[in-house]
Amino acid sequence: MAYTRPAYRPPAAPRPHSHRLPRPVYWRRRSVVLVALAALAFVGYLAATLCFALLNPSYGSSLSTRASQWGRQHGLASVVSWGANEAYHWDLPKKGGTPPAGSFGHGATTKTYASPLVLAPPVNIVSPVKSPLPGEGVWHVAGRTTANGIPTMYEAFVRPDAVHTSYVVGVVWMDTNLLTAQLYSGSQIPGGGPFWHHAPISSNRSKTLVAAFNSGFLMQNANGGYFSDDKTFKRLRKGAASVVIFKNGRMTVAKWGRDVVMTNQIATVRQNLDLIVDNSKEVHGLRNPKSTKWGTVLNPNDDVWRSGLGITKSGALVYVAGPGMSLSDLAGVMLRAGVEEGMELDYGLDWVQFSAYTGVPDKAIDGVDGRSLLSSMPGEPSRYFGSFWAHDFFTMSLRDNELRKTVSTTTSSTTTTPG
């Protein structure tokens, strides 16, 4: 077959440069593309972190609270606060009314024991409502008892004021002679770590667990410091309301620098704002809407979920929590429960949580053995047994000498206090 060589083709003439964009236009378009890609990446980051927050139970129990927490972490604190304030005024707490039946507790009431180691039981709380309902303010045995069956805690329920009469708040009285306190730190509060004590509560420590409850604000809002594990995570402020735990396990509430100063016997100091009860009196200014001593996020006169902790003259701890309370209402309930020095802890339905645990002393338990102080608390008692829980919290546990039965403390007389 004959081979035919292709005809020679000269090279094409150079193409004119007229199709190329002017340099300013070229760089302008490239800048637009780069900005668009950066914006897309940023939006993707926000979407990913928001999804993580919505799926993360440590950000709160409800999706709205988780979204709010995410917003505060991403520079939207003012927007979140504005939205929360608007939502509050659209859904103000109900005035008047009567709480549901069975709101004031049940079971055995206060007991008096023939032992100098046991604090005298508390006196019933006088309701702020003119006509108290049956059982209102009456103390009932709660939580794990000692090996001798001696109650370590009592709980009572009372209405917060004479206006919001359909709401009920819970009050817990804890015997510091029988119980030892511990602060558990978290990766969100105070941040950092590692910590000697952190969630989850271990099986071994659960053997003596009696109660666990929420601590205070995020540190950037607490106007105070944080000391634990022989380390200062945030500098302590003189004059701040302080939960102080000593190395012997005793806990108190004090004004830092006046009532307590740093010594080698202190294990923990957790500060949160200023005292709201001082020397058995409500601190002046709690009703001032312009005051910033007790935080800038929430108006002190807003009737919302709040919690607080105080100390009585005898050394008993008193925890108060519930809905429909202004800061002054919280202080008022504390005073009715015998508190001499008291402070606010956290606020908001998702963060206010007290769990009492039952079980045989020196036997491991878990979240199913717990019960919330109020059934309306969305946080489950199991939250403190989950590694996801990133907030700090307190526990109260049986002292070692209360794990063994003895003869001297078993003699007792039971007093049923009328409602």
Image: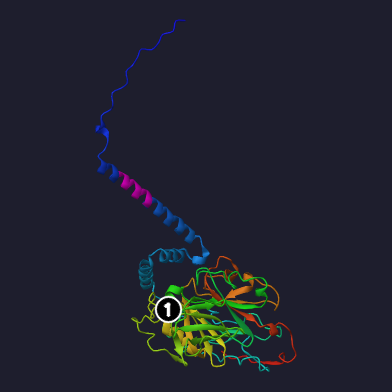
- Seen from the viewer's position, the closer of residues 213 and 376 is 213
Residue 201 at x, y = what percent? 62, 71
Residue 151 at x, y = what percent? 65, 85
Q: Is residue 228 visible?
A: yes
Q: In this view, does 302 lie above or below 257?
A: above
Would you say residue 351 sits in the magenta stretch?
no
Q: In this view, does 231 lie to the left or right of 324?
A: right
Displayed quadrant of residue 313: bottom right
- Seen from the viewer's position, the closer of residues 30 and 61 is 30
Q: In this view, does 228 lie to the left or right of 29?
A: right
- Seen from the viewer's position, the closer of residues 128 and 292 is 292
Q: Where, quadrant-wise, is the C terminus in this rendering? A: bottom right
Q: Is residue 129 visible?
A: no
Mark 1: amino acid: Asn
Would you say residue 32 sits in the magenta stretch?
yes
Displayed quadrant of residue 129: bottom left
Majority secondary structure in the magenta region: helix
Displayed quadrant of residue 89: bottom left
Give the residue drawn at x 37%, y 80%.
292
- Seen from the viewer's position, the closer of residues 167 and 299 is 299
Residue 393 at x, y = what percent? 54, 75
Residue 303 at x, y = what percent? 41, 78
Label 1 belongs to which residue?
223
Q: In this view, does 114 lie to the left or right of 322?
A: right
Q: Residues within 10 Å of mark 1 (few under 14, many from 20)?
A: some
Quick one: SS at disc 1? loop
Residue range in magenta is: 29-38
